Image: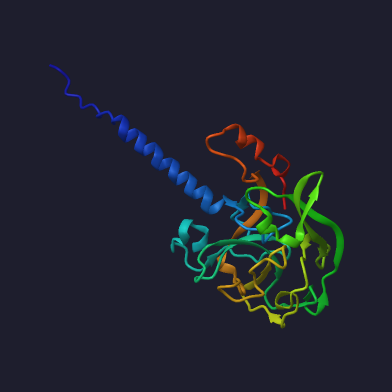
Amino acid sequence: MANDVKTKPKRSETSETFRFLLKLALVVLILRSFIFAPFSIPSESMLPRLLIGDYLFVSKWNYGYSRWSLPAGIPLIPGRIFGSTPTRGDVVVFRAPEVLDHDVIKRVIGLPGETIQMRQGIVYLNGKAIPKQRIADFTIPLTANFDAEKCGAPFVDVVANVQICRYPRFRETLPGGRSYEVIDQAELPDRDDTGLYTIPAGHIFVMGDNRDDSGDSRFPAPNGMGYVPLENVEGKAVVNFFSTDGDAEWLKPWTWVSAARWSRIGEGF
């Protein structure tokens, strides 16, 4: 008498491929939402530290999680969990106000309950000036993603027959000794001389390192960011993993190498 054994039907190749892709998408979603996420720099607001064409990793666990930790802000996380406040000087990625509705990267300058004011281009934190020291000019070659128009006519220069952008550069040093470089292009009263800002509870005050070309907490939306709610903070910038000057062409693979700014890869914060 033959054994009546039921054999498990084999899955089709299409089914197996679909299951693999589904698992891969789930792993990527978890990594991107809770561990690391990539971020590309679209503007010059964080010069000199970040250039247009830089790609960096953002760590997601430093300040807790909210709906903005998830792709497209899927509202699966209520409020903010495992939350902590950024350290002054951190470079963070956050969700801009609803009227703008995109991710932004800036430097944290003020924390909840503190006061900020700009006087003649100097940042006053809780009534005390943040030291600002003039250092060597910041220079960058003009390229496809940072041309003369973005640089601004007064700052275009020529060195060894190469067109460059040259900006006045300064070093700011926060209380506690943390320092970073900033650009201050000119005396502009609307951004160099402001009223007194008092940062509300549950918010931070952010600024771009390119002080005269950054829509940040000095300005309300849609021209700036206003005070940034902590639950909008998505993560902390940790390292550059690629950078391109924009001169690459898809149909010329060799330009993918020549356009890369190799010296910027691996730069931390």
Looking at the image, which is closer to me, 166 or 108? 166
Residue 36 in the figure: left or right of residue 24: right
Residue lying at 31% horizontally and 30% vertically, measured from the top left: 13
Residue sticking out furthest to the bottom: 195
Residue lying at 16% horizontally and 23% vertically, measured from the top left: 4
- Residue 212 in percent (x, y) is at 71, 68
Looking at the image, which is closer to me, 260 or 267? 260
Position above or below: 59 against 264: below
Residue sticking out furthest to the left: 1
Q: The N terminus is located in which quarter?
A: top left
Residue lying at 81% horizontally and 64% vertically, measured from the top left: 172
- Residue 110 in percent (x, y) is at 71, 72
Position above or below: 166 against 120: above
- Residue 236 in percent (x, y) is at 64, 57
Residue sticking out furthest to the top: 1
Looking at the image, which is closer to me, 40 or 146? 146
Position above or below: 249 against 59: above
Residue 116: name its quadrant: bottom right
- Residue 182 in percent (x, y) is at 77, 62
Residue lying at 66% horizontally and 53% vertically, measured from the top left: 147
Residue 188 in the figure: left or right of residue 233: right
In this picture the colour scheme is rainbow
Residue 34 seen in this snapshot: yes
Residue 266: name its quadrant: top right
Residue 64 seen in this snapshot: no
How many circles with numbers are drawn on the protein?
0
Residue 191 in the figure: left or right of residue 172: left
Residue 262: name its quadrant: top right
Looking at the image, which is closer to me, 89 or 135? 135
